Image: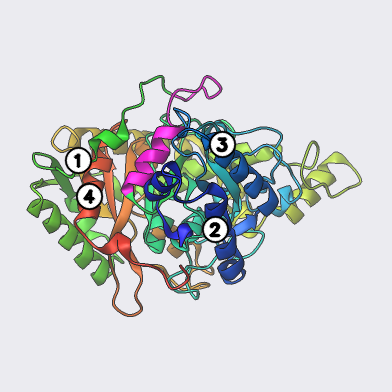
């Protein structure tokens, strides 16, 4: 089944002309037809356009090998519906943008096209990336391919579910507080959150501009390295993009981690709500790293306990400013009113879901006169302390290891009535975004009953994705977890 192949395997078979890109795309389309009625990972898929792209990719290979610089030629990739692709819907999972069509390509989309990728379709998400379960989408819930009574995580739940169910070969998501890594953990795939400034945000609809990053969701670490190679690099269209050379990520995947130091934060051991099976799987993964030759030492992140509270002040504050543009005037939904103020109110009332409204209200409150210093300014100071903790820890170690999430995937509806419990699903991931560092989640085991994936998180120094990928690849290739197939796969 071609749709079950990795990027590396499919690219190799395409290069040797054992299969065609049309065959690979058709296999993905057949899988979407077979399982997506139950899964609901895709919001939009234009089969005819995807097959036309595939035919063009096949034609580009004849009579020679793939043109240089096109490592993804003919590989079907899907994008979270918060990343602009010219001529395709861009809804951000929200009714307020239900009929909006992107007028331009995001930089990452343009780079994927330049690398030869087939852009297969648009993937479901929590509305405007605000959520940890993909239950907040304005277009219905995405389900977990391991157990359809459970969430796939969020906000990139559609991306993780589609990859785990082999509806596409790989996907892109966005990560503001764990939205690539947590769904990757819940769905048993690999999710990489790059360092802030490593991947262009041009064409990514903003949630929290100082936190958002686009990252790959893939079946293997090698595939994550391949996608990172394609989408990384300086972009003059993004003022936060850092002009640094892009490493050869594939070259570091040697399987050798001897001499590398892993840090275990003593504060995370005391986190409440950490499931016993998750703790056991992560402890076993740490011992496995030791058996591979890595050294493990204890480190301290003394301000980690404040990460959740800090995040849920800064992110809503930035969201309240960013989402002010959705007012019914220039694009998206418009609900008429007697005057402009009534039109704004009616449009936003009808177009935004409950979680988006909650975060806009919270963000507006913490930015308001009399509360800015007490909340937002204090949160920014704590953010600085959190980043300082990580940088001091990285003076001792090459990476830090934690669970990705405190539990495996929870049941649909289990946390929707208690926003605080939902927010705690990101307790291990938000500090990475606050500190602007990189992080990766990869499978490290399964719960017993029901069988659900468990995610291991590795956190790295700024712009040191190469070391994270090296560690993750060594672990992955000496463990069986990534070879497991979901029931809907």
Q: Position of residue 343 (x, y in %)?
A: 83, 45
Q: CA distance from mark 4 to mark 2?
A: 34 Å
Is residue 206 something that shows in the picture? no
Q: Earlier in the sequence, mark 2 or mark 1?
A: 2
Residue 223 on the magenta segment: yes
Q: Which residue is mark 3?
A: 109
Q: Which mark is residue 28?
A: 2
Question: Who is closer to the viewer here, 233 or 67?
Answer: 67
Mark nearest the camera among 4 and 2 is 2
Find the distance from the CA under tag 4 to the CA under tag 3: 31 Å
The CA span between labels 3 and 1 is 29 Å
Mark 1: which secondary structure?
loop
Q: Using the numbered discs, state the Cα–Cα distance from disc 1 to disc 4 in whole angstroms.
A: 20 Å
Instruction: Report the residue at 46% width, 25% height from top.
Output: 241
Q: Is residue 147 above or below residue 403?
A: below
Q: Which mark is residue 254?
A: 1
- CA separation in Å, label 2 and label 3: 19 Å
């Amino acid at each position: 089944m071609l749709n079950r192949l990795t990027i590396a395997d499919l690219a190799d078979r395409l290069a040797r002309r054992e299969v065609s890109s049309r065959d690979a795309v058709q296999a993905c389309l057949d899988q979407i037809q077979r399982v997506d009625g139950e899964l609901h990972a895709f919001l939009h898929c234009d089969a005819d356009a995807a097959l036309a792209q595939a035919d063009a990719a096949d034609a580009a290979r004849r009579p020679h090998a793939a043109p240089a610089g096109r490592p993804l030629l003919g590989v079907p990739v899907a994008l979270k519906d918060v990343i602009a692709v010219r001529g395709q819907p861009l809804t951000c999972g929200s009714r307020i943008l239900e009929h909006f069509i992107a007028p331009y390509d995001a930089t990452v989309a343009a780079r994927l096209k330049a690398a030869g990728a087939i852009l297969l379709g648009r993937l479901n998400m929590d509305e405007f990336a605000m959520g940890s379960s993909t239950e907040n989408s304005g277009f219905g819930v995405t389900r977990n391919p391991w157990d359809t009574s459970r969430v796939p995580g969020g906000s990139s739940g559609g991306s993780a579910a589609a990859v785990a169910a082999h509806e596409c070969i790989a996907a892109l998501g966005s990560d503001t507080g764990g939205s690539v890594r947590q769904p990757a953990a819940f769905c048993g795939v690999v999710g990489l959150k790059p360092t802030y400034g490593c991947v262009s945000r041009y064409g990514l609809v903003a949630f929290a501009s100082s936190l958002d990053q686009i990252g790959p969701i893939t079946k293997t670490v090698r595939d994550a390295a391949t996608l990172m190679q394609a989408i990384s690099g300086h972009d003059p269209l993004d003022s936060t993009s850092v002009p640094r050379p892009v490493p050869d990520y594939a070259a570091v995947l040697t399987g050798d981690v001897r001499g590398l130091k892993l840090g275990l934060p003593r504060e995370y051991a005391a986190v409440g709500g950490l499931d016993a099976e998750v703790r056991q799987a992560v402890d076993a993964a740490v011992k496995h790293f030791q058996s591979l030759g890595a050294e493990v030492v204890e480190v301290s992140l003394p301000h980690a306990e404040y990460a959740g509270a800090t995040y849920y002040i800064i992110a809503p504050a930035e969201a309240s400013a960013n989402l002010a543009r959705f007012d019914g005037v220039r694009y998206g939904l418009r609900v008429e009113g007697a005057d402009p103020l009534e039109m704004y109110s009616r449009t936003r009332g009808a177009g935004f879901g409950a979680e988006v409204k909650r975060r806009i209200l919270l963000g507006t409150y913490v930015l308001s006169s009399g509360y800015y210093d007490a909340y937002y300014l204090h949160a920014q100071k704590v953010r600085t302390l959190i980043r300082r903790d990580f940088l001091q820890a990285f003076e001792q170690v090459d990476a830090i290891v934690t669970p990705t999430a405190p539990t495996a995937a929870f049941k649909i509806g289990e946390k929707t009535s208690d926003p605080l419990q939902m927010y705690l699903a990101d307790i291990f991931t938000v500090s990475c975004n606050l500190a602007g560092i990189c992080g990766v989640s990869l499978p490290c085991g399964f719960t017993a009953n029901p069988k659900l994936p468990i995610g291991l998180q590795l956190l790295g120094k700024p712009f040191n994705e190469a070391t994270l990928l090296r560690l993750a690849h060594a672990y992955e290739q000496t463990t069986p977890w990534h070879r497991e197939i979901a029931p809907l796969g």
